[in-house]
Each structure stands twice: as C-alpha cells, then as structure tokens.
Image (cartoon, rainbow, N blue to C red):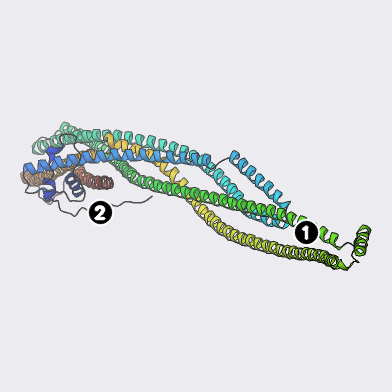
Amino acid sequence: MARFTVSSKDRPLDWAVVTNVRVEEYQEDNAPSDGLIMATQMLLTSRLDEKALLGRSQDELLHLARVLQLSAELSAALSEQAQDDVEYLEGQVKQLQLDFASSQVALGGDEALKQLNEANRELEDMYRRLDESERERERLVEEVEGLQSAPSNLEQLRLQGELDQAREENARLGRRLAIAEEDAERERERASKHEMELAEKTQRLEDVHAALKHKTQDMEELRAMVQAEQRRAELSDQGKSGDRNKLKAKNRELDRMLRENKLLEKANEDLRSAKFKCAEEVAQLSETTVVLDARVRDAEEVAATLNASKRELERKMDALREHAATLELKLEERDALLTTFERKFASQCAEWQARESQLVSEVESLRQPPTEPDRSARSTSRLVAEEPRSSAGADIAPAGHASVLNGSGNLASALRDARSKEVLLLEAYEQLERDTKAEVCDALAEQDDELNALRGDVQRLEQQLKAERQRFVQLDEALAAAQGDADEARSQLGAYESGVYGLPDAMRGLKMLKRQLRSVEDELGATVRALNQRGEQMEDLLEENRMLRQRAGLPEEEALDVTGFRAASQVELEQLRALCRQLEKEVGLLEDERRALKVELRFRAKWQGMEAARL
C-alpha cells in the first residue's frame, strides 16, 4: 500500500486572503467562490500558531473562525461530491458490463455462423457451374475462393473464441466482486467495532481521570493530616502509644491509597496506549481511502481504454467484411463478362461453320463433270451450228464456259477469304484466351497481395488482442480490488458526512486536547509548587528538630531510632516523585497524541483540498 507523507506547514498565514472572503455571501445557499477556495488551500498549507495570531484584533480572529467554519463546510460538500463520483464510477462499471453483453450479441452467434456457411455453399455451387465450362479456370477460381474465404472463417472462429473468453472473464469478475463485497462488509464491521471500543476506552479514561483526581485530593488531605499529627507528636511532651498507633494507621491508609493510585495510573496508561492505537488505525483508514480513490480512477481509465480498443476492433472487422464483399462483386462481374463473351463467340463460330459448309458444298457441285443430257445438247448445238452463220453460236459457247469459270473462281476466292477469316478468328480467340489468362493472373496476384496484407493485419490485430487480453486481466484485478474498496470508501465517506471523522470534529478534538494539555500543565505546575512547599516544610522541620534537640539536651551528632518516621517520610517522598514522573509522562503522551492528531488533521485537510482542486 502506498505511503502518504504530510509536508511541514512553514508557510506564513496570509491575512489578506482571509479578509477578502466575504462571509455574508454564504449565509444562503451560494456556490463557493474562488476566494473561498483559495483561502481554504492557503489555510491547509499555512502555519496557524500563536505567532500568527499575535497582535490581531478580536474582529479579525472572529472572521478567521468563520472562514475556518466555511472551509469545513466546503470540505463536507466536497466529500458529498466524492460520494457522487464513486456512484458514477459504479454506473460506468455496470455500463461496461452491458457493453460487453451487447458486443456479444452484435458480433453474432450460431445463427450468424449458419448464414455465413450457407453463403459459402452458394458461392461453391456457382464455382462448380463454372468448372463445367473450363477446368483450368475452375482451379484458379477455387484457389481464389479458398484464399478469400479462409481468413473470414478464421476471423469468425477467432472472434467466437474471444467472446467465450470474455464471458468467462465476466463471470469471474462477478465472483471476485461478490468476494470483495463480503470483505468490505467485514472491514466495516471491524471499523465499527473499533469505534465502539475507542468510545468505551475514552469513557473509561475519563472515569479513571476523575477517580485519579479524587484520589489525589484524598491523598493531599491525608498527607496534611499526617503532617499535623507528626507535628503534634513531636511538639508534645507526652508521647503516647495511642497517637503512634493512630499515626501508623494513617500511614497504612496512605499506603493503601497510593497503591490504588498506582493501579489507576497503570490502567490509565493502558487506556491511553489503546486510544493511540485506535488513532493510528483511523489514520491508516484515511490513507486507504485515498489509495482506493486512486485505484478507482485507474480502473476507470483502463475501462475507457478497453472500450476504445473494442470499438477499434469492431471497425476493422466491418472494414474486412466490406472488402470481402467487394472482392465477391468483382469476381461475379468478371464471371458474367466471361460468360457473355463465350456465348457470343459460340454463336459466331456456329455462323462461320454454317457458311463454310455452304461454300464447300457449292465448290464441290461446281467441280463435278457434266451429265449425258448436257453432252447431247452440246452435240446438237454443234450440228446446228455448222452453217456459215455458226460464228454466233461459237461465240455463245465460250461465253457460257467463261461465266462458269468466273463463278468457280469467285467461290474459291470466297472460300479462301472465309478460311483466312477463320484463321484470324482463331488467332483472335487465342489472343483473347491469353489476355484473359493474363488478366486472371494479374487479378490473382492482386488478390494474393491483398490477402497477404490482410494476413499481416490479422497478425497485428492478434498481437493487439493479446495485449488487450493482458490489460483485461489487469483490469479484472484492479476492478475487483476497486469494487471491494469502493464500498469501504463509501462507508468512510458516510463517516465523514455524519461527522465521525470530519474536519469540524477533528478541530474540536484538537481544541479538547489543547485544553487537556493546559489542565495537565496546570496540574504539573501545582505539583511543582507543592513540591517547593514540601521543601520549605522540610527545612522548617529540620529547624524544629534542632530546636527540640537543644531542649532535650541531645547533641546533633547523636543518632536516634527514627525508623518509623523515616519510613513514612521516605514513602511520602517516593510517592511524590512517582507522581511527578507520572504527570510528566502523561504530559509527554498528551503532547505526542496532540502532534499525531495535528498531523492527521493536516493530512485530511490536504486530501480534501486536493479533491476540491480536482473537482
């Protein structure tokens, strides 16, 4: 647990800051001004002693007391604000748990996984239909599908595992929170028990003080009576045995009362030590409250960081899903374009094949020899053409043959053109296949690059997820500790609000200790004066002893049997010395207790000032 130290208050009191505070403005429910906050901070770090108050008028001292009262009320208000902050932190913790639950629902479950599998099956069916037209393109497309769908499935499985781990960690957080609440309840019971014991011991201490004072008065009365009896016995010419017995009885009574006084002093010392231990425990509880506030703030910061990391991961997952959908759309567009080109090419090839068959049939029909009717017709025409005017028929025959030859030449040239076009079309088809293959290879290379980049992003996200998981474990521990300590801080704040450990009560306790210290100092002064009186009385007794020796005719060198008187006087002297030492010890203990309470008061005032400055 962190240790907190309180700096020494060496700063002088600035009366200008105190006088600038207008107390009349705060008679109603007004907000604290900057002047009051500045005065409160100055009073928390200033030295308030007799030197600072020396030479001030009664009005200024009264104004200072009012400013101190306002500062105490401001501290109480800040304590209430701290309580509100603790409740707000609990609300944030609950909101964090709700966000985790909503993220589990948003990221999907078994139904989302089924839909994803159905979409993958439909995509595989489409690829199988493409495989029926071209085997080579099927292999490439299946490879693209495998490279594209694998990261998505891996990401879904990884997210599902992370969600399961988050559920387990959330359940473990709830269990640890319940344990912490039980521990906080036990700590509250122990604190209340200590408070009751402290109140009981304080009451017993007051009773012991009263009994000690009463016994001291009785001892003084008995001592006076013993001295009177001793003087009467020394001055009396007739020493009777009855007086001696009475004196011995008084001495025994005095011894008994002194023993009772010692027992009461021992009980008083035990009660003071117990009270000091309780004060130390109260100071430790105050330090624990400050530490718990720091832990709560750290837990809030870690929760905010985790929320930001979760939102960043969700954004990256959405980006990956959009990228996968874009790749699927591009692949569908390319498949549709390739199907359209295949249909057009198939129809054009069918037309070219039909045209080629027609041209081949025409050429074959032209290349066949003439039939018999044609030959008889030709011979008849030759017989008729034997006349002198046969020149015209001779001209007709060569003309028909030339037309036939011209038709066959045209058909041959058309056939050559068709074959050249077919060659060109085959070359164009091969070029188209090469271009398509190059385009597919480029697309696959581009997709490989994108997949490699996605794999790098996935690895980086996995590393970030590992770091976030470690931070989540730390948050788990901090949240469990902070949740348990928040209840303890709430109970401590309730104690501040109820006035058990508030600044006004601490001021009143300090004033009471000062009054006790002054009373003890007065008692010590009275004891010193009584001791001086006893010294003077001792000198008087020595002079009376010399006078009595002269009257009795006894020399001063002669020894007398004064065992009984010496024992009584020695006991009385030792008792007075013991009482003086005890009073000095009590003064020292009260001074130590005053310093401890003053340090605790400064520490609490400083802490409240820090909270006020933070708010």
Q: Return the mark for residue 7.
A: 2
Residue at position x 27%, y 38% in the image: 501
Q: Which residue is mark 1?
A: 356
Give the x, y percent position of residue 324. 57, 51
Q: Quadrant of residue 393?
A: bottom right
Camera-side residue: 54 or 551?
A: 54
Residue 42 horizontal side relative to residue 467, left or right: left
Question: Disc 1 vs disc 2: which is toward the camera?
Answer: 1
Give the x, y percent position of residue 535. 11, 46
> What's the CA distance linking mark 1 and mark 2?
110 Å
Residue at position x 36%, y 39% in the image: 88
Q: Is residue 180 above or below residue 14?
A: above
For the residue marked with disc 2, what is the amino acid?
Ser
Residue 332 horizontal side relative to residue 254, left or right: right
Q: Return the mark for residue 272.
A: none
Residue 576 horizontal side relative to residue 487, left or right: left
For the residue marked with disc 1, what is the amino acid?
Glu
Structural crowding at the residue carrying mark 1, measured as other residues with C-alpha within 10 Å and reported as few (<14), some (14–19) or many (≥20): some
Give the x, y percent position of residue 135. 73, 55
